[in-house]
């Protein structure tokens, strides 16, 4: 048995962990994956060479880089029997907030909330693909990934078009208080998802490290929408909302391309 350690600089929340799990799912030489999200490290226990594993990690464009490969005597691993239940929990939270943010975003005329709702939907896709892939064939997983990726890109492009329309049009100011309040609840929801998934790994991780929360992409986005809400009120302009919306739509498209890589 060999142990190969990777540094993955853009792995900052559990949805990226699931992307990597799905990408490596078809490699038979892998015995176990050990994720360390706070330190952005992945340790792969495997037989044979690590070339195929390294190639798959790099293909996801998450800043993956092999650090070392060494022999190990470890052959037994603690499997998480509650993984499916945990995935359903975080899927439900993310999808619920997709509905909440999309609805309140449309009502309050906030593109920041609409964009963040798509980011929540993107995470839901990742968890959903993981669930449907359990016990399913690799072909089935790839089909679902392809549909999810293209659907996500389509929604993000529609969002970009709407941002441009509002930028050049005379649109009513978004409701800054709705932006702030809903984003605070989304921030809490993301924190809960991160806590649920990280707590499941081991008893030692029952209490999250602060770095684990605040390096998470989703939570940075939530903070960005909250800041945009304050800026809308302060400047009496919709531009901060449109700017954060554009940034998040770009991140959603980037995430969609990562999902599409799973379908290849």
Image: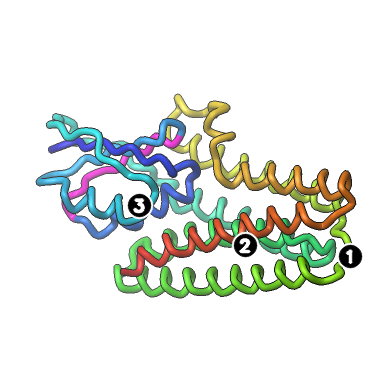
Residue at 37% x, 61% y is 134
Residue 49's label in the rendered image is none
At which x and y percent is residue 33?
Answer: 30, 43
Q: CA distance from mark 1 to mark 2?
A: 22 Å
Residue 207 in view of the camera: no
- Of residues 187 and 248, the one drawn nearer to the viewer in this rendering: 248
Question: Main SS type for the magenta part?
Answer: strand
- Of residues 73 and 23, the one drawn nearer to the viewer in this rendering: 23
Residue at 36% x, 51% y is 20
Q: Earlier in the sequence, mark 1 or mark 2?
A: 2
Q: Which residues are magenta?
A: 28-37
Residue 159 in the image: above or below residue 236: below
Which residue is disc 2 drawn over?
A: 118
Which residue is disc 1 drawn over?
A: 172
Residue 5 in view of the camera: yes
At which x and y percent is residue 47?
Answer: 13, 44
Q: Earlier in the sequence, mark 1 or mark 3?
A: 3
Report the side of 115 relative to 55 (left or right).
right
Q: CA distance from mark 2 to mark 3?
A: 22 Å
Q: Residues within 10 Å of mark 2 (few under 14, many from 20)?
A: many
């Amino acid at each position: 048995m060999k142990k190969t350690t990777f540094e993955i600089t853009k792995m900052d929340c559990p949805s990226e962990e699931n992307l990597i799990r799905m990408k490596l799912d078809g490699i038979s030489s892998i015995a176990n994956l050990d994720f360390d999200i706070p330190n952005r490290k992945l340790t792969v226990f495997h037989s044979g060479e690590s070339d195929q594993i390294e190639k798959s990690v790099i293909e996801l464009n998450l800043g993956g880089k092999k650090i070392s490969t060494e022999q190990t005597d470890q052959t037994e691993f603690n499997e998480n029997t509650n993984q499916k239940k945990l995935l359903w929990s975080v899927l439900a939270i993310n999808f619920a907030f997709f509905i909440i943010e999309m609805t309140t975003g449309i009502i309050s005329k906030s593109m920041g909330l609409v964009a963040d709702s798509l980011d929540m939907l993107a995470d839901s896709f990742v968890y959903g693909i993981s669930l449907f892939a359990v016990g399913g064939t690799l072909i089935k997983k790839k089909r679902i990934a392809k549909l999810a990726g293209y659907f996500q890109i389509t929604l993000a492009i529609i969002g970009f078009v709407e941002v441009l329309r509002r930028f050049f049009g005379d649109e009513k100011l978004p409701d800054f208080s709705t932006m702030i309040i809903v984003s605070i609840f989304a921030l809490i929801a993301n924190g809960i998802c991160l806590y649920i998934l990280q707590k499941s790994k081991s008893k030692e991780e029952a209490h999250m490290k602060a770095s684990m929360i605040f390096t998470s992409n989703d939570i940075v986005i939530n903070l960005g929408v909250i800041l945009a809400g304050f800026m809308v009120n302060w400047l009496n302009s919709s531009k901060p909302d449109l700017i954060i919306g554009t940034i998040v739509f770009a991140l959603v498209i980037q995430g969609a391309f990562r999902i599409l890589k799973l379908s290849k």
